[in-house]
Image: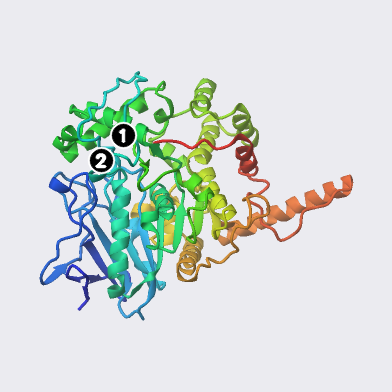
Amino acid sequence: MDVFTTKSGRVRGRRAARDRGIVAVLGLPYAAPPFGARRFREPQPAEPWDGVRDCTAFGPVAPQSAELPGAPSWSPGDEDILTLNVWTPADGPGDLPVLVWIHGGAYVFGSSAQPDFDGTALAGGGLVVVTLNSRLGFEGFGHVPGADSDLPVPDADSDLPVPVPVPGADTAAAAFPDNRGLLDQIAALEWVRDNISAFGGSPDRVTLAGQSSGATSVACLAVADRARGLFRRAVLHSAVNAFATVEQAARTTAEVAAAAGVPATRAGLLAAPPEALVAATDRVCERYAQDPGSGQRHYDPAIYGPVADGVLLTADPLEALAAGAGGAVELLVCHTTDEYWLLDAVGSSAKITSEEQLVAFAADFGLPASLVEGHRERLPDAPLLDVYLSLYSGLLFAEYSTRLAEAHALAGGRVFLARFDRRRDRAGERVRAWHCADIPFAFGNLHEESVHFLVGGPPGAADQELSRRMARAWAGFATHGEPGWAPLDGPAGNGATVRVWRTEAEEEEADAEEEADAEEEADAARRSGGARRADGVRRMEGARGAEHGFRDLWRTAGLPLLAP
C-alpha cells in the first residue's frame, strides 16, 4: 500500500503508469486554499485531516484563462490550488536527492499537471521529484494597496505618477504582501523540509529548478533571505528578464482594476472575484497588444512579475547575485538558442516586419543602433522578423540568463552554464531550438504527444539519447553538484566551459565546423605571424553559426533590466 505519513496526515499515492517502480502522490496540499479570508494574504498551513487522504489525481490549477494540452483548466470555485506532487522510488534507499520544480507561464498560466513535468523518468534516475502549483496573475503578483489608499486610475495615455507606500514600510500592507506567488513557493519548500523524508528524500539535498518565469522565481528565491537554507542548488532554464518596482506594480493594479470596473483599493479588489481579475488582466494585455504606441508592453504583454517590495526582495536577481546575495547556492543555468521563435509561432508576440517597426522596437527598449546592426550583419540572409526575434531572444532570455550565471561566478559562486541547440528532428529536418523545447528532454517526457509541437514532432533515437544525457546532468547536479562539465570560471565566451546540448550527429557536425575554423585561424595566423587559439576549448558559440558573436554585441551595448 503506497501510503505515506506527513505532518498533516496520511496520504495514498498510486504507481506511475510508465514505471511501476515509481509512486506518484498527486494533489497533496502544502497550504490552505488562499481565498475567502485568506485572499491576497501570506499562505497559511493546510488543515490536518483524519484517515488516509487519496492523492491519486492532480489538484486544481491556479486562476487563469489558459487551456493547455493535457492539463486541467481552471473553473471559478476551484480554490484548493496550493498543492504539490511527489514522485519517488517505491523501494528507494531513503535520503535521496530532491528536485523541486516551478513551472513557467509568464506568471499568469501553467500548472504542475502539464505532461511535460511528469516526474516518473527523473525519479527512476534516483531523485525524489516535487512539482507544485502556486498563485498566478493578480492573485499571486498583483499589488494590493494599503487599507486607506485610492490609486488614481490612469487612462491608456496617462503619465500620471501613482502614489505608493514606501517599500517595506507599510505595516498594514504587510498583511497583504506583494510576491504572494513566491511566498507560496517558499511555503512549498518549507513543506519539503518538514515532510520529504517520509517519501525517501533528504531535506538537506534539495535542488530548486524552474523554467522561464519559474526560473526567475528560482533566481529570486536564491537571493531572498527568507528562503535561505531551504535548498542548496538551483537549476534555471531560460530565466526571463522582468522585475517590477512597487510603483510599476501599483500602476498595473490601477489598470487591471479599471478594466474590472472596481475601485483600485484593497476593498475594491477583494470584492472582485478571481474570474473578474483574470478577465480584466486579459483585457489589459490585449489593449497593449493592439496598441503599437504603448511602449515595451506592446511586444509581449506580460504584465506581472516579482516586485522589489523591500521585504522579500530588494533588487533584480541579477543585481543581487552580482552583490553576492546568492551565497553558497550552486547554479546550473541554461537557455535555448532560438528562444523567442516560440512566442512568435504561438502568436503572443508582435510581428515586426518593417524597418520603421524595428527602429521603434529598439527605441522602446533603449537598444543602441550598433546592437541592431550587429545582429543584421550576422544574419545577412534572414528576414527582418528573424533579426527582431534574435534581438528579443537575447533581451528577454538568453543574455539575461547568461549574465545571471556570470554574476554569480564573479561573486564567488559555483555555477555551470549550458545552452540547448538541438536543431534537427528525427528525419533530419530543421527545427527551432526555441523556448520550452529543452524541458521535455530534461524531464524524459518526449513520448508525450502534447510536447511534440515544442520539439518538432515525435522523437527519434538520437533525441531519446540526448534526453537521457540531459536527465543524467540534472540528476548528477542534484546529487553531488556535478552535471558533467566544468564550472564557469569567468565571463562566458572568453574560453569558459559551456555545455551545448545537441544530438550526437549534431555534435559531430559542430566538431567538424570547429576543426575547419581552427584550420582557417591557423592559416590566417601563419600569414600574419600571429598565434592561433589553443585547441580543446569549446567556444561560447560555433564560429560559423549566426549566434557567434552576439555576446560581444551585448557586452558592448549593455543589457537593460526590464519590468513586466
Q: In the image, is residue 199 above or below residue 42?
A: below
- Identify the residue at horizontal 26%, vertical 60% (top origin): 84
Q: Is residue 230 visible?
A: yes
Say which label, 1 or 2, has the lower sequence index. 1
Percent coordinates x, y for residue 477 in the rendering: 49, 66
- Identify the residue at horizontal 30%, vertical 45% (top origin): 109
Left or right of 277: which side holds 514?
A: right
- Identify the residue at horizontal 32%, vertical 56% (top origin): 186
Residue annotated with mark 1: 165
Question: The disc labelled 1 sits on which kind of residue?
Answer: Pro
Which secondary structure, mark 2?
helix
Q: Could you say which is closer to the camera, residue 324 or residue 476?
A: 324
Are the residues tagged 1 and 2 within 8 Å (C-beta)? Answer: yes
Image quadrant in which the N terminus is located = bottom left
Residue sitting farthest toward the top = 157
Residue annotated with mark 2: 173
Q: Could you say which is closer to the camera, residue 409 or residue 482?
A: 409
Image quadrant in which the C terminus is located = top left
Q: Is residue 16 visible?
A: no
Left or right of 189: which side holds 322?
A: right
